[in-house]
Image (cartoon, rainbow, N blue to C red):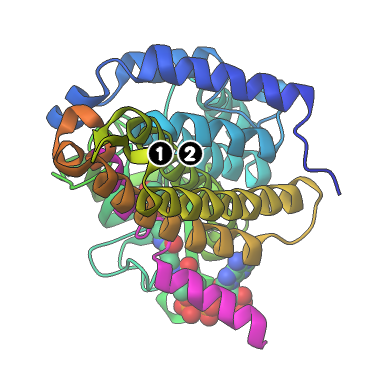
Amino acid sequence: MNFELTEEQLMIQQTARRFAAEELKPGVIARDDLQQFPVEQVKKLGELGFLGMMVSPEYGGSGMDTLSYVVAMEEFSKIDASAAVIVSVNNSLVCYGLEKYGTEAQKLKYLVPLASGKQIGAFCLSEPEAGSDASSQRTSAIDMGEYYLLNGVKNWITNGSSATTYIVLAQTDAEKGHHGINALIVEKGMPGFTVGAKENKMGMRASDTHSLHFTDVKVPKQNRIGEDGFGFTMAMKLLEGGRIGIAAQALGIAAGAFELALNYSKERRAFGKTLAELQAIQFKLADMETEIEAARLLCYKAAWLKDNGQPYGHASAMAKLFASQIAMRTTIEAVQIHGGYGCVKEYHVERLMRDAKVTQIYEGTSEIQRIVISRDILK
Ligand code: CAA
């Protein structure tokens, strides 16, 4: 067992840390306030290879392992969790899905621009009435021979308006239940496809979350990913990897809040001492660090399993469940340590607390992770 990152992973960590400090930190409060997508920052992330981290260089990616991705996600999320979720969805849901299950033609047409950061992708599973109950898809993709006729509404879509390539899950044959669901690649600009309202969210406010509307969109047959009826299984498989990314994001939020609270506690004085000299604060810091380290190990383990070709769905669910809980707990304590200043935007911790809550909800709520874990234990 080796707990050390490789030289390459350490270099990625340094690069991500520097990028977060120099490029993400300036303006992070305003972007959150104004719900402003980090256009320039995402462009630079693409140029540095962070949007297709695990994709083979053959398809424009950086050819890195999942652990490197986790390490980078933690660094970005310490500073700007909104930017991090844009990175995560593009990497682990869209790029991974296309590389793993797409045809050569799909990879050349769609994966290359996504992995090289020239375009952004979105993954469209959730619907107004199909969130946690993801197999209850109402969006339909009727087989018309040469094409699928796509109709329906998707909700809560990350990168909803900034994406150009969308992986859309839809029901082709309702009688077959989840075996009748397909995953289709839909391009922005296809007639009948419109981007709907932007959600005014509590957290992750700089990432654009939209509803999407499909009215008689003709999606060419060659845009289906995988065999007929493979869509739901594919979505579940992609989410196993996606949850590693979100777990790492939650870890980063916790670690970022911890760093802020630690620094503040060393500077702020009360009762003739710094806060850090008070045992009430010392114990909080000790708990925070212990829990963050445990979350980090769960994230690393899930990434290691994926990198080593072993099943990782159970581990990724545990990592996401735990890291998102820790993100919530740590950020609440970080606000508490900051006192009144914790409620002020300029001190960053209140934003991290709002962002933390989202990690307990998207890519499978904490309750869904418990379903995945317990089914696995009991089967
Ligand atoms: N890998 C492969 N196949 C899987 C699988 C997995 N991890 N999990 C389930 N399946 C298969 C099952 O084997 C089964 O297939 P068969 O019938 O052939 O055996 C089929 O899928 C249905 O499985 P279940 O009976 O377990 O399905 P269910 O209806 O009980 O639901 C669930 C399972 C785990 C609750 C699932 O619906 C789920 O994960 N829900 C949460 C959805 C989610 O995470 N949404 C997030 C949206 S994406 C997002 O948030 C991205 C973003 O923008 C940030």
| Residue 113 coordinates in the image, percent (x, y) | 52, 21
| Residue 172 showing in the rendered view | no
Q: Residue at x 52, y 26 (%)?
A: 51
Say above or below: 214 vs 114.
below
Examine the residues drawn in magenta and state their main secondary structure: helix
**How far apart, in angstroms, are the residues tagged by discs 2 and 1?**
5 Å
Q: Residue at x 23, y 30 (%)?
A: 347
Residue 85: mark: 1
The residue at which mark 2 appears reads as: 88
Tag 2's secondary structure? helix
Q: Residue at x 60, y 19 (%)?
A: 14
Say whether residue 376 is magenta.
Answer: yes
Tag 1's secondary structure? helix
* Kind of residue at badge 1: Val
Mark 2 crowd level (few <14, some 14–19, many ≥20, 10 Å Cα): many
* Kind of residue at badge 2: Ser
Determine contact: label 2, label 1, CB under 8 Å: yes
Name the side, left or right, on which 263 lies relative to 162. Answer: right
Q: Nearer the viewer, residue 16 or 154?
A: 16
| Residue 219 showing in the rendered view | yes
Please state the total of marks drawn on the protein image.
2
Query: Is the CB–ligand 1 distance for label 1 below 8 Å?
Result: yes
Mark 1 crowd level (few <14, some 14–19, many ≥20, 10 Å Cα): many
| Residue 346 coordinates in the image, percent (x, y) | 19, 27
Which quarter of the picture shows residue 187? top left
Which contiguous range is marked in magenta?
351-379
| Residue 76 coordinates in the image, percent (x, y) | 46, 29
Which quarter of the picture shows residue 95? top right
Which quarter of the picture shows residue 326? bottom left
Say above or below: 74 vs 30.
below
Q: Residue furthest bottom?
A: 378
